[in-house]
Image (cartoon, rainbow, N blue to C red):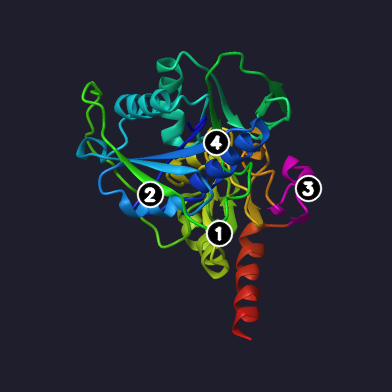
Amino acid sequence: MAKVLIFIEHAHGKLPKTSLVAIAAGLEIAKKQGLDTAAVVLGKGVDAVAAEAAAHGVGKVIAIDDAKLEHCVADLYAKAVAGCAKQLGSTWVVGAATAAGKDFFPRVAQLLDAGMASDITGLNDDGSIVRPTYAGNVMSTVSIETPVKVVTVRGTAFDPAPKAASAAAVEKAALPADATGRMRFVSFNETKSDRPALTDAAIVVSGGRGLKSGENFTTVLEPLVDVLGAAMGASRAAVDAGFVPNDLQVGQTGKVVAPQLYVAVGISGAIQHLAGMKDSKVIVAINKDGDAPIFNVSDYGLVADLFKAVPEMADEVKKIKAH
């Protein structure tokens, strides 16, 4: 019986980095608690995704392939995951703290009468859990006292699970007949881009209110983003000002990223923004205010007019790449 059940989120037939992080967290929980693991994949036509998940070290993969699960609808997905957990006798249910995970995992906890910890970043040997509070300024250690424990994992907290020496078995399962939902899928308006996904990118260039307009995101920031092969991000102030769509927001109420290189342009560095990027490996800040809080967390800081510095930086990168 698999005591740790890991929910595998997927998109366009592929596993995002966040799902591999969830697998890594589930495997660590299983190792420290001496438990077995299983992963569950929901959707329509999920054979390829299930096979990919099976290659990353889990004990087995449960594939529930049903037309009703083509789109992630919170109440139905929660019933499917909770039903699978009950059938397997799982004492831990693990998923990524993505938009979908934040939406339906509390429902999973309710259906299982389980305590829940969200956005966790670590697990101690005694089973207690580490998670950020106060916008990441304090790390709390909490214990879940219920027999079943439900957690979502911060997408930057663990290294993605590597491929294992051999693949696990994939078992087909049916959606329980009584698993119905009152919610109805209407539409999904996806933002399409040739750039890397914000949460998966090795380099992120983010702009703030200092860019002054959405047009400047296009004319000033985008050339640097593209020459670096980076993803574009933004502060909440820039999003709230209408400069860019909210799916680009990095921060406590946006996406949490930890790329190899994070370039903050015209961002003051409010604690809400820092919560979403301070784990980046190298942070570069460009701001004309030398007292901006962003410089307290940056590895390299440039006090300069971004409208002059950013184009110069893009030109220098082009020259380097040309040689």
Answer whether residue 295 is magenta in the image. yes
Q: Residue at x 56, y 38 (%)?
A: 26
Tell me the residue that label 1 is attached to: 165
Tell me the residue that label 4 is attached to: 36
Tell me the residue that label 2 is attached to: 50
Q: Residue at x 52, y 37 (%)?
A: 37
Name the mark nearer the viewer: 3 or 4: 4
Q: Residues within 10 Å of mark 1 (few under 14, many from 20)?
A: few
N-term-proximal mark, 4 vs 1: 4
Part of the protein shown in magenta: 281-303
* 245 and 131: which is toward the camera: 131
Question: Residue 42 occupies which quadrant of the picture?
Answer: top left
Residue 56: horizontal and vertical position, in percent? 52, 52
Q: Which three-letter amino acid code belongs to the residue tagged 3?
A: Gly
Left or right of 248, for residue 252: right
Determine whether label 3 and label 4 are within 8 Å by CB: no
For residue 198, above or below residue 93:
below
N-term-proximal mark, 3 vs 4: 4
Q: Which three-letter amino acid code belongs to the residue tagged 4?
A: Asp
Q: In terms of secondary structure, where does tag 2 sit? A: helix
Q: Residues within 10 Å of mark 4 (few under 14, many from 20)?
A: some
N-term-proximal mark, 3 vs 2: 2
CA–CA distance between discs 2 and 1? 17 Å
Mark number displayed over residue 231:
none
Q: Which three-letter amino acid code belongs to the residue tagged 2?
A: Ala
Tell me the residue that label 3 is attached to: 290
For residue 85, above or below residue 69:
above
CA–CA distance between discs 1 and 3? 51 Å
